[in-house]
Image (cartoon, rainbow, N blue to C red):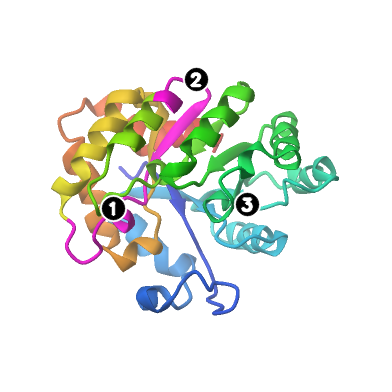
């Protein structure tokens, strides 16, 4: 039965200027990645759908994803981009709210100064999300966890999900400060976490599932099983792995869990969080 949801993947028509973050070390993803490229991978791994997440910071990006979703019904939801710092943010959100596939928004905070999430204009944007029932994806590096903890605490009624387990430095094996941050942020009822983006924080050429295990252990120890969802981070994962291998790594890790708990991680939690 195909009932899994990939809660985190991207589409793009590669543009070397706009997508300058995809540098020469990531040459393998310097090309277009579109729904027809993803669908066979989803089908093979028993996924019925996905959530497409913004990769560039423009309203054009949101419209691009909306257009793809209108033509591909396996795209169950979109996490778009809007300038949360805009003085007219509520107007922009109202504009997008006519499209029901848009479930939430994200800003690439990992590329911003460490105090970004404390800024009044950004927080004003976060405050504007709830009336539209929009979610917010937190994309940060580990060092930005303290700011994220403050954010989720100050907006207790806003649904947040942490992307890529907050990007710990898996390659170096450093875990302690990240672990402290996860222990703290997981205490907040309004925070979910995506099991995604781990292989690209590991040693791209030489990672093994054992390298990820200590980090997964921390996530599963601190977050209740109904707050965790799987995301592939396709096609970015291709720099370090492939779709099937990333799925299998999590399958193996949760193989001893009850069927009910496995279904939560693969499907139900994403479905609930994003109202798919």
Locate residue 135: give its quadrant: top right
| Mark positioned earlier in the residue sequence (3 or 1) | 1
Please identify the quadrant where the C terminus is shown.
Answer: top right
Circle 1 residue: 45
Front-most of residues 272 and 62: 62
Q: Start and end of the magenta stretch?
A: 184-207
Q: Is residue 152 left or right of residue 89?
A: left
Q: Is residue 14 left or right of residue 97?
A: left
Is residue 103 among what the camera can see?
A: no
Q: Position of residue 25 (x, y in %)?
A: 36, 75
Report helix, strand or loop for mark 3. strand
Task: Determine whether 209 is above or below 127 in the image.
Answer: below
Residue located 47% across and 37% down the image: 145
Tell me the mark number nearer the camera, choosing from 1 and 2.
2
Q: Position of residue 126 (x, y in %)?
A: 69, 36
Residue 204 is inside the magenta segment: yes
Tell me the mark number nearer the camera, choosing from 3 and 2.
2
Tell me the mark number nearer the camera, choosing from 3 and 1.
3
Locate residue 124: give its quadrant: top right
Please identify the quadrant where the N terminus is shown.
Answer: top left
Q: Give how far apart the Cα atoms at labels 3 and 2 are.
A: 24 Å
Circle 3 residue: 80
Pointer 2 local density, CA inside 10 Å: few below 14, some 14–19, many at least 20: some
| Mark positioned earlier in the residue sequence (3 or 2) | 3
Front-most of residues 273 and 169: 169
Is residue 133 among what the camera can see?
A: yes
Circle 2 residue: 189
Residue located 54% across and 59% down the image: 72
Q: Give how far apart the Cα atoms at labels 3 and 1 are.
A: 25 Å
Q: Position of residue 232 (x, y in %)?
A: 36, 52
């Amino acid at each position: 039965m195909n009932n899994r949801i990939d809660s985190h993947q991207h589409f793009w028509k590669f543009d070397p200027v706009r997508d300058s973050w995809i540098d020469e070390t990531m040459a393998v993803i310097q090309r277009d990645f579109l729904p027809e490229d993803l669908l066979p991978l989803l089908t093979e791994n028993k996924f019925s759908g996905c959530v497409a997440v913004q990769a560039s910071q423009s309203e054009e990006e949101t419209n691009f994803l909306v257009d793809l979703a209108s033509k591909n019904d396996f795209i169950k939801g979109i996490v778009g981009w809007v300038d949360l710092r805009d003085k007219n943010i509520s107007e922009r959100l109202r504009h997008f709210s006519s499209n029901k596939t848009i479930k939430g928004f994200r800003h690439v905070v990992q590329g911003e100064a460490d105090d970004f999430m404390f800024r009044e204009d950004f927080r004003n944007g976060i405050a504007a999300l709830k009336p539209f029932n929009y979610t917010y994806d937190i994309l940060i590096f580990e060092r930005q966890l303290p700011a994220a903890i403050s954010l989720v605490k100050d907006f207790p009624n806003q649904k947040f999900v942490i992307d890529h387990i907050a990007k710990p430095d898996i390659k170096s094996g450093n875990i302690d400060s990240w672990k402290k941050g996860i222990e703290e942020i997981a205490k907040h009822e309004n925070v979910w976490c995506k099991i995604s983006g781990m292989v690209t924080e590991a040693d791209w050429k030489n990672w093994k599932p054992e390298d990820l295990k200590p980090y997964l252990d921390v996530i599963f120890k601190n977050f209740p099983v109904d707050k965790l969802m799987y995301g592939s981070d396709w096609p970015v994962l291709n720099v370090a792995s492939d779709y099937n291998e990333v799925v299998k790594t999590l399958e193996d890790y949760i193989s001893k869990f009850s069927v009910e708990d496995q279904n939560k991680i693969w499907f139900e939690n994403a479905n609930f969080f994003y109202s798919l």
